[in-house]
Image (cartoon, grey):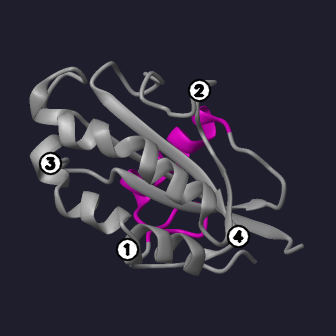
Amino acid sequence: MPEHQLAQLNIAKMKYGFEDPELADFVAALDDINALADESPGFVWRLQTDEGDATEIGFFGPDYLVNMSIWEDVESLRDYAFRSAHKDLLARRNEWFDRMDEAYAVLWWVPAGTIPTLEEASARLDSLRKLGPTAKAFTFKQLFDPE
């Protein structure tokens, strides 16, 4: 087992209420896209309720969706996010979510087997927003090694 795994957090501010027809395509895809993550090579863990999603976790506010997961390495997450059916949802992001002027996604390394809290994830996102990419909080555009 590697010493470190990759944690990621991303948030999105919904343009519409979860029951709004404008969000229907996104809502309809959630179960399949979550199952795809769960079955993807390198997937370790994702934040979810007992029902298997995270749509009711209002940590960042009632209009925000939160996604947090752990992956074995950067390539595993990159493959899932940008080279699977997930990329089709990303392409439609602006239909369902407000454009955010500040960082909405952050990556960081955790000791293998560690599950970060939402408080820690939020602090990492804040660090990225304030300091830019560092070894503590970074993006796909500027990666850092676990060491």
Q: Position of residue 97 (x, y in %)?
A: 18, 42
Q: Which residue is mark 3?
A: 99
4 or 1: tag closer to the N-terminus: 4
2 or 4: tag closer to the N-terminus: 2
68 over 80 or under it: above or below: above
Task: Answer with left or right where residue 130 lies relative to residue 6.
Answer: left
Task: Answer with left or right where residue 120 lies relative to residue 113.
Answer: left
3 or 1: tag closer to the N-terminus: 1
Secondary structure at badge 4 equals: loop
For the residues labelled 2 and 1, say whether their Cβ atoms are less than 8 Å apart.
no
Label annotation for residue 49: 2
Q: Which residue is mark 1?
A: 82
Secondary structure at badge 3 equals: loop
Instruction: Tell me the residue at 25%/42% (across/down).
Output: 26
Instruction: Tell me the residue at 65%/75% (across/down).
Output: 73
Membership of 122 in magenta stretch: yes
Task: Out of 2 and 43, give the one closest to the viewer.
Answer: 43
Give the residues in magenta: 117-139
Q: Which residue is mark 4?
A: 72
Residue type highlighted by circle 1: Phe
In front: label 3 or label 4: 4
Mark-to-mark CA distance, 2 and 4: 22 Å
- Quadrant in the rendering for residue 76: bottom right
